[in-house]
Image (spheres, helix red, strand yellow):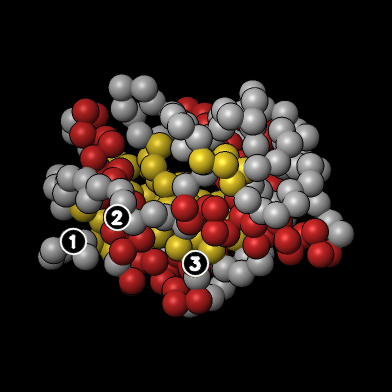
Amino acid sequence: MSTILRLSHPASLNKFYHVPADRTHWQDGDYRKLKTAGWTPARAPASFGCQTAALQKNSAVGLERQYGIYVLGFTVPSPALYVGIAARSRVPEGIDTRLRKHRIKVTGSHVGSAPDRSGVNHTRQWREFAPERYRHFATTGCYDDLDDAMLLTGDIEGLEDIGDHKKVCEYFEHMLVNDVRYFEILTRALLGVAADEVFRLNSGKGGRGQTPAVPGIDFWGSSTEWISGQLP
């Protein structure tokens, strides 16, 4: 039996959400390293408030109950792409929750309840990308509402044991990020550029997951790529 990741057509994030801008000043684009909660931007609490308020639904009904793969692409200040998982784990987070966290990371927003509480851990690639993005919008005099952001999501079909969901999600994430053929399809579709022009927002520290039986990737109904051979 085959296990297929079915990816949706790429669409603007603003099709699903209204993105309230973070209007707080970020003087140096710096971050604070916290003792127990990773990194958070060294700036005032986000003007939009908390993580829950980071995105306001337009037509995203169902994303909070959808699990699998999601891909975010950005063109400002330069092309960047992130592949994430929303797994049915012991403490599951749907795609909606995961998107809220990455919306906070890409604008370098601080949503902790105090300067020494992060709310969201801003990992290294986001700490490199977000300050450059902030400086771009500060230079233009505009606020960042993620108007350039593109999104696609993916469901996994044919998985017999739901207990393996996280590991299989990790497998497909690894393939999409590390196999240049699949990464190129994503960058062309979401950003209109070649893979070697895109900054990878994934840390590269994710697991390789578990190879499912007869794995394949359906790219928005246009073609199904069957995967064989060793993991890249």
Viewer-nearest of discs 1 and 3:
3
Q: Callout 3: few (<14), some (14-19), or many (20+) C-alpha neighbours within 10 Å?
A: some
Q: Going 73% across and 61% down the picture, which residue do you hit?
A: 135
Q: Callout 2: few (<14), some (14-19), or many (20+) C-alpha neighbours within 10 Å?
A: many
Query: Mark 2 falls on what kind of element?
Result: helix
Left or right of residue 172: residue 189: right
Circle number at residue 231? 1
**Amino acid of disc 3:** Phe
Do the residues bearing badges 2 and 3 touch, measured as CB atoms within 8 Å?
no
Give whichever of discs 1 and 3 has the lower sequence position: 3
Q: Going 83% across and 64% down the picture, which residue do you hit?
A: 140
Query: Mark 3 falls on what kind of element?
Result: strand
Q: Is residue 13 visible?
A: no
What residue did someone put label 2 on?
A: 174
Residue 197: percent from the left, percent from the top?
50, 76
Residue 211: percent from the left, percent from the top?
16, 49
**Quadrant of the rendering where the C terminus is positioned:** bottom left
Give whichever of discs 1 and 2 has the lower sequence position: 2
Do the residues bearing badges 1 and 2 touch, measured as CB atoms within 8 Å?
yes
**Amino acid of disc 2:** His
* 83 vs 140: above or below: above
Q: Nearer the viewer, residue 132 or 163?
A: 132
Spatial CA span between label 1 and label 2: 8 Å
Q: Quadrant of residue 69?
A: top left
Q: Nearer the viewer, residue 82 or 57?
A: 82
Left or right of residue 230: residue 94: right
